[in-house]
Amino acid sequence: MDNQLIEQIEEARARTLDDARPGVVDKIHASDRLTARERITLLFDESSFIEYGALAGATTQPDDEHYADGLVAGVGMIAGQSVVAASYDSSVFAGTQSDRNHRKIAKLLYLAVEHRWPFVCFVEGAGARPDDPLPPPPIAVSPRGRFELYDGLAEMNGWAPTVAVVTGNAVDGHAAIAMLCDLVITSSDASFGSADGRSRKVTDFAKTGDVDVVANNECDAIEEARRYLSFYLTEPSSGNAPPDAEHIADIIPQNRRRPYDMRKVIASFADADSTLELGADWGRSMLTVLARLDGRTVGIYANQPKSPLAGAIDAAAADKASRFVELCDAYEFPIVTFLDNPGYMVGPQAEREGIARHHARPLAALHHRTVPLYSVQIRKAYGLGPYAMSGWGAARRVPELRLAWPSVESGGMSLEGAAYLVKRKEILAAESREEALAIRDGYAERMRDAASGLRAGRAYQFDDIVKPADTRQRILAMLQRTPRQISAHKKHPIDPR
Amino acid sequence: MKDETNDALRQAKDSQQDTSRADVVTHVHSGNKLTARERVDLLLDPDSAVEYGSIAAKSGDGEWIAEAGGVDFVGTIDNQPAIASSTDYTDHGGGYGAGRLGRLFGLAYEQRWPVVMFVDGGGSRARHPRAGLGHIETSGPIGRFSFLDGVPELSGWVPVVAIVSGPSFAGHASLAGFSDFLISTPGSAIGMGGPPMVEASLGHRLKANELAGSEMHEVAGGIDLLVADERDAIAAARRFLSYYREDDASAKETNLGANLDNIVRDTDDRYDVHEIIHALTDPGSVFELRPQFARSLITALARIDGKTIGIMANQPLVDDGVIDQNAATKISRFVELCNTYEYPMLSLIDTPGCISRWQLKGQDPGVDPLLTRWHARPLIAHQQRTVPLISVQLRRGRGLGAALMTGVSSTRGVPALRLGWPTAEIGHRDGFSAVVDHNAFDDIVAPGETRHRIERMLRLFKRKLDRPQKKHRIDSW
């Protein structure tokens, strides 16, 4: 072969690399950002990246300088397993989407669907490219695959994980990619925008549940993406017990009305440094956390007594739990729940937010799950609260193991609330507030013994009442008897909301 | 059989009838309401009702009677088998026989019968916290399901209709919240916690309707239809189920009188897309769902040439036909309903695209032309849709708007037939159109020709109700 032909290609390829364009790279680094290629390099295991469409350009001219047509994309590895990734390059036509880079990403989504490889997309850019100069080639010679971009992502949803890492301003079509991914991680200064120049910072989206993780910067965001995917891709054969495992009971205050931080319970239960919290800034009365238990991946969701709603489940918390159950079920992460809630949120505001409709979402998601679920009731779970956290009572899926701690208070509503309703006449007739409270609390105390942990165990309301420090071992022992089984078919989508 | 046994049985049954409790019936009627038995009588076809638990104990000297508080039947509605259940708020506050309802849910599951249930009831029975389940007392699982897991299991398998014509709280509201189609009446309420519980836990003293009124839900999306009274609610339930039946041969009538050519004119024109929906469908066949919620997007059941079709349409008259978070939710839930009920779909597209509304603490409310995850829901719903969809682009289909109405037009979500009117905007460039498809339509049709085209396509589709399993549930939101 004519050596010149080979050289021409290799030269063109070399020009796409960061080394070949120091000016552009310096400018990106000056603003504390990574280049599109650096993100890919950080994401993947060393030397594992196989690039697709490196030579694509905005024109077919040999000296075209729109490298990779603004999208560095291909197949690489994370923890030794294949993952496809695409990274928009804001230094090429402002990272815009074109016919070529659309077909490139569509081709990679085809690979991802066919081989069940996770998909990561670094999104920033100005949406569709105005006046894209190249018309699409005839279909016969156009590598694209079965999917376009958005339907490829919809097809992936619930089949293999999809992650969007938002690194800058993601406009229109770029934002659409993010909203279709299972998990959205952003750097803290990123934003979503529209073609007319309007935008909103990602921290707002984190408060509404449209962004899952806000990382400090791009490097941290990439690390979180790797961590998220590692929950799906690998399970080490062991893990380190948390340092405070023996003292987990100390987190629960002696005064049963004092709140505590459920994050501490989770940290003392899961493997050391293994947790990744999703959606920390919204539906704050519900925590959703991926973690490991002696190396096994688990999805933990739990009520947060130390939150404005004191653990009550409002529409946002219900949506958050429901989506998390679907995510865990789709990717076969066993579920662990910690219960301490006063039930679903009541009152005019909660009703306006549609709690009567939203409350059913986690119940339905739990009803249709097939991954095992292990529940631990710490203190209370009133009304429909236990259903939301474990599907307790549902004939199709009951928790594989339903535990409670000795501090458990069983019952349909708070003892004080029940006492108020029973003694309402006397309470309203009381001369003073103190007297009213005394009547209420006196009656509540009489009911308390009936709702104690030991009574609950005697009534077989739980499979066991366990010592808090034994909980980890107990669930671990069950996990070992329920090995992860990956369904050969997609079970169901993960509802974006 | 001994006469005395027969007499005892007759007496036991008679005692449960409205004729044996004239004072209660008078009280119910004075509030312009129907008794539980009257509701079911109106709901089911004459002489079709078979009662379950007709002599179940309703009182017991202060004893806890789990099966009190309601009546349960199987029968037919327009000759189609159905479960009909009603709580009875005059009896133990409507805290009714959950075990019996669970049993009927089992029948509905096995026989694939639709369910219609009146679920107004008082909610909490605070005197019995020991039961663990609180207000939901069961007499134990006597059927395939306990009662709460029956509804998610039935969701997407058979139509589940709930009617709330009074205060409905806690467990009762939960049943309502799970239903596919929730009908309510003015003055009613649907909420997680009733006035006593709200008073006990939050200190607010509110009447049921102030706390969680159905009028509020009508606008907020919590119910599917608000009607004047219980009789209208029963008519609405029967009507909703009528679309599920086989084709309605009597409705075969064309409706070409309306001149469609002059409704959509130019890009600045705001028109009422209801006119177009009515002109394309059989006379009197349009039945709108959630009409007051997210009004920029219309969802309706209708018939064309006697065949049921689910119609979604952007409404340019309201906010120019934008798709906000609520409109997106309205789309995805409707697609799920049509997909599980096996209704072919028709999308009438004329939208400037998506917007998001923001109400964050400490910030002024805002409206942005931005996407949220709510906007991704319809795309996911379309991706699992297998019922055919016909789309007609009347004018604009900008941004992600058209994709939300049809699914992404490429592979699985592709409309079975994509039509455009001569007024359709083709090849619009915006921030979403990296690849502009100039071959966007299977055909451009004159407005007046549209119905013929749809009618012919509908004849080719076959309803696949004989699936051995349900496809998926219908999201409650």
Image (tube, coloured by chain):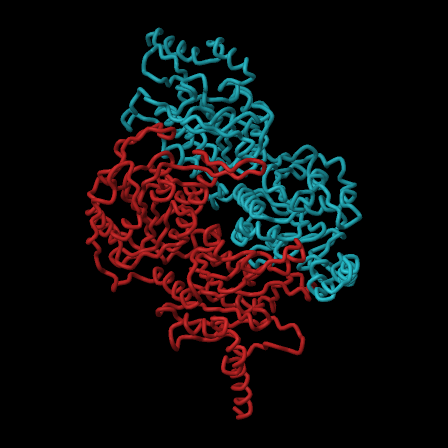
Numbered-mark total: 0
Does any portion of residue A454 appear in the rendered image?
no
- As drawn, is A392 to the left or to the right of B318? right
Indicate the quadrant where residue B378 lies.
top left
**Between A177 and B398, the one nearer to me in the picture:** B398
**Drawing shade for chain B:** red
Is B11 above or below relative to A149?
A: below
At 59% from the left edge and 77% from the top edge, which residue is drawn? B57
Q: Colour of chain A?
A: cyan
Q: Is residue A217 above or below residue A19?
A: below
Residue B237 falls left or right of residue A33: left
Between residues B87 and A464, which one lies in front from this camera angle?
B87
As drawn, is A238 to the left or to the right of A13?
right
Q: Position of residue A54 (x, y in %)?
A: 41, 18
Q: How far from the left and from the top, in percent, is residue B365?
A: 51, 38
Q: Which corner quadrant of the image does residue B351 belong to? A: top left
x%, y% of residue A19?
49, 10
Q: Position of residue A352 (x, y in %)?
A: 53, 50
Residue drawn at the location 43% of the way across and 33% of the way down:
B369
Res B349 visible: yes
Residue at the extreme bottom of the image, as rendered? B3
Instruction: In this rendered view, identify the residue nearer to me: B310 or B102.
Output: B310
Rendered residue at 66%/34% (across/down): A274
Q: Is residue B72 above or below residue A308?
A: below
